[in-house]
Amino acid sequence: MVVEGVGQEVGVGLPALRVVGSEEVYSTGFRVGALAGASVGVFTAGGGALWERWTGARAEVGVDIRHAAAAFRSERYFRINGEELSLWGSLSGDYATADGWVRLHCNFDHHRDAALRALGIGRVSREEVARVCAGRTRLEVEEEVTRAGGCAGAMRTRQEWRSHPQAEAVAAEPVVSLVPLGPQVSASAGWGSAGSGESPAEGRPLAGVRVLDLTRVIAGPVAARALAAYGADVLRVGSAELPEVAGVVVETAFGKRSCHIDLRTDPEKLWDLVARADVIIRGYRPGALETLGFGAEELARVRPGIIVVDISAYGVRGPWAGRRGFDSLVQMVSGIAHEGGDGTRPQPLPCQALDHATGYLAAFAAVAGLLRRAGRGGSWHARLSLARTARWLDDLGRGEPGPDPRADDLLDTMDSAFGELTFIRPPGSIKGAEPYWSSPPPQRGEHPPAW
């Protein structure tokens, strides 16, 4: 079974997972339903394993594929006072080139400006971008924009991608990599360091676990939000200077607190948080935090027993290691968008499946690290990438398309500082410890940088 295989990869045993519903969801031959069920399912089973370890009771865990698949479009169902989110910048999108297609990701102003510089365009004009792209090849645009510090992805066939050196490097990695990190410490008798006095038997599977969320857009925030749904104390660390996709920040912040720290001028505030954390999820471009002194080894030295979970677009090995990327770009370069559109024009998956699947897998990696620390001791380092998740989806094979999953009975509402929020309830089920978010999304930087 897929879920058991992921558990075996990281060295943890998982309780049996009850799966209900059909995987034939969404209008695509890619098995998005199976991907949703497997990624949400393995995280839920991981939470069940924690529950079993600390309570001694057998965990009854399950996943409804329709609910999991609908959660993969959580940002599209989300409403603030009935209003939908604006998800894309004005220049983001697919552009025809002299020999195919290329996608530009321009949701952040600095990525938009980099693309305009690379293309020699002095003003924000979609028509002008289209004109310039039409006169260049897809790979020329991809490389020029990337060199300028922007984000682009040329549409490739599945065969082109599989023969690419980066695809070969990605394929050599497990779906979830989890390895020992830094100084070894003895096995933990508890599950977290919060000292709240609440035990999983009385509360929730991740009660007492402190999680630092250093992520943006969408996989990392989804991972931290999933941990919050089982009771983790999640503190998102951002900066007033960093650009954000405002609505998406709100949608992925249920159950979290939010603080601001400028790591360039005030790094000690983050070190103080690290010293008392259990898990840190990092979603910045590989190497970015290392240049500021926050490498995984340094984190483990300051906080022996830390679980470091790193999420990237293309992994940390190969010629594209460290390259900026997003779900839509990975779909373009990996052949997913080409296959979906029969090669004539890009047709992405009907949801940000790579982001959401990687987010739930990253949440599972954090739980697996806690289980390994409890049983063996030590600090642990997990790595995941959108490109490896794309390979996993590809390897699942193809299935029959189906209708979009019905979600009206999966929605809930909550009052917040932003107004009334409509949202998809967290998927997955542990009997006696159902997931839920105990607080609405905070405003950016609302809380002090403290546990």
Image: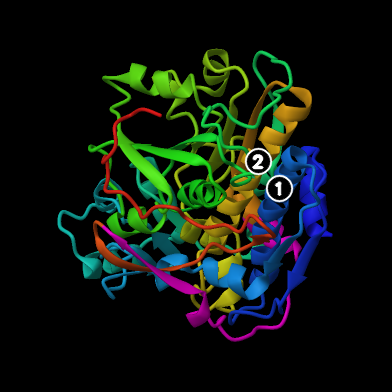
For badge 2, the amino acid type reads Val
SS for dot 1: helix
Q: Quadrant of the C terminus?
A: top left
Q: Which residue lies furthest to the left in this view?
A: 123
Who is closer to the viewer here, 142 or 48?
A: 48
Q: Earlier in the sequence, mark 1 or mark 2?
A: 1
Rate crowding at label 2 as few (under 14), some (14 to 19) or many (20 or more) other CA atoms within 10 Å.
many
Do residues under tags 1 and 2 come within 8 Å of each other at their CB atoms? yes
Above or below for 248 versus 271: below
Label 1: which residue? Answer: 46
Rate crowding at label 1 as few (under 14), some (14 to 19) or many (20 or more) other CA atoms within 10 Å.
many
Name the residue rendered at 50%, 47% in the picture: 228
Q: What is the quadrant of residue 97 in the picture?
A: bottom left
Residue segment shown in magenta? 390-416
SS for dot 2: helix
Label 2: which residue? Answer: 367
Q: In which quarter of the image is the N terminus?
A: bottom right
Q: What is the quadrant of residue 205 in the picture?
A: top right
394 within the magenta span:
yes
Above or below for 227 versus 450: below
Name the residue rendered at 33%, 29% in the picture: 449
Query: Residue 207, percent across and down?
Result: 57, 40
174 within the magenta span:
no
